Image: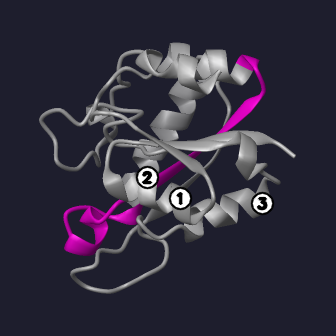
Amino acid sequence: MQKAVFLDRDGVINSDVGHYYIHKPEDFEFNDGVIEALLLLQAVGYVFVVISNQGGIAHGHFTVQDVEKVHEKLIHLMDENGINIKDIYFCPHHDRYEKCLCRKPDSINIEKAIGRFNIDIDKSFMIGDSLRDIQAAEKAGLRGIKIDSNQSLMTIVDQML
């Protein structure tokens, strides 16, 4: 079994300062400390899975293809820095229009990744910047670590090591 870090995207991996929705690759910028923290965690055997709500799709602000382009950039930049992201799961829905199980605080996307990648939930956790991230983690049996939006992951990496 593998140990994993599940990561919210906007506000955790990338900066969302000045943007409510990050849907253009040119707006994607890593938060301070992300690369350094993930390299440290990867060196001790953690794998990474991104779990993100992308309700702007349901609102009609952008498309699935727009989100996928941002994810392509994220994966490319992570690869350039020697970090392997196992997969990215995102929910395109919003409660205003429909109820689903993939939108955090529900945990189906986390549970899919746990099964697919044979994740040991006792050695894994989720990092998020909202209560719904932590609730989703807990529903899946993971420990949740809440950070402030755009906080450097280096400030909490000791808790994870």
CA distance for labels 1 and 3: 19 Å
Instruction: Tally the marks.
Output: 3
Q: Work out whether mark 2 precedes mark 3 in sequence or the reverse, and give the earlier one.
A: 3
Q: Looking at the rendered structure, which numbered label has been put on residue 116?
A: 3
Name the residue nearer the viewer: 51 or 128. Answer: 128
Evaluate whether residue 62 shows in this view.
Answer: yes
Q: Amino acid at mark 3?
A: Arg
For label 3, count other residues whose C-alpha is less than 10 Å away and answer few (under 14), some (14-19) or many (20+): few
Q: Secondary structure at mark 1?
A: helix
Residue furthest left in the image: 18
Percent from the top left, x then y, of residue 134? 43, 52
CA distance for labels 1 and 2: 6 Å
Evaluate whether residue 82 shows in this view.
Answer: no
Evaluate if marks 1 and 2 touch, with contact meaning CB atoms under 8 Å apart.
yes
- Using the image, determine if residue 159 lies above or below residue 101: above
CA distance for labels 2 and 3: 21 Å
Percent from the top left, x then y, of residue 4? 69, 41
Percent from the top left, x then y, of residue 123? 73, 40
Q: Left or right? Give the position of 33 relative to 20.
A: right
Q: Looking at the rendered structure, which numbered label has been put on residue 134?
A: 2
Q: Looking at the rendered structure, which numbered label has been put on residue 138?
A: 1
Q: Amino acid at mark 1?
A: Glu
Percent from the top left, x then y, of residue 37? 54, 18
Q: Amino acid at mark 2?
A: Ile
**Residue name at image x 78 percent, y 27 percent:** 45
Q: Left or right? Give the position of 61 relative to 66.
A: left
- Using the image, determine if residue 145 lies above or below residue 67: above
Using the rendered view, name the quadrant where residue 114 is placed.
Answer: bottom right
Q: Left or right? Give the position of 26 relative to 102.
A: left
**Residue name at image x 77 percent, y 50 percent:** 119
Q: Secondary structure at mark 2?
A: helix
Residue 49 among magenta residues = yes
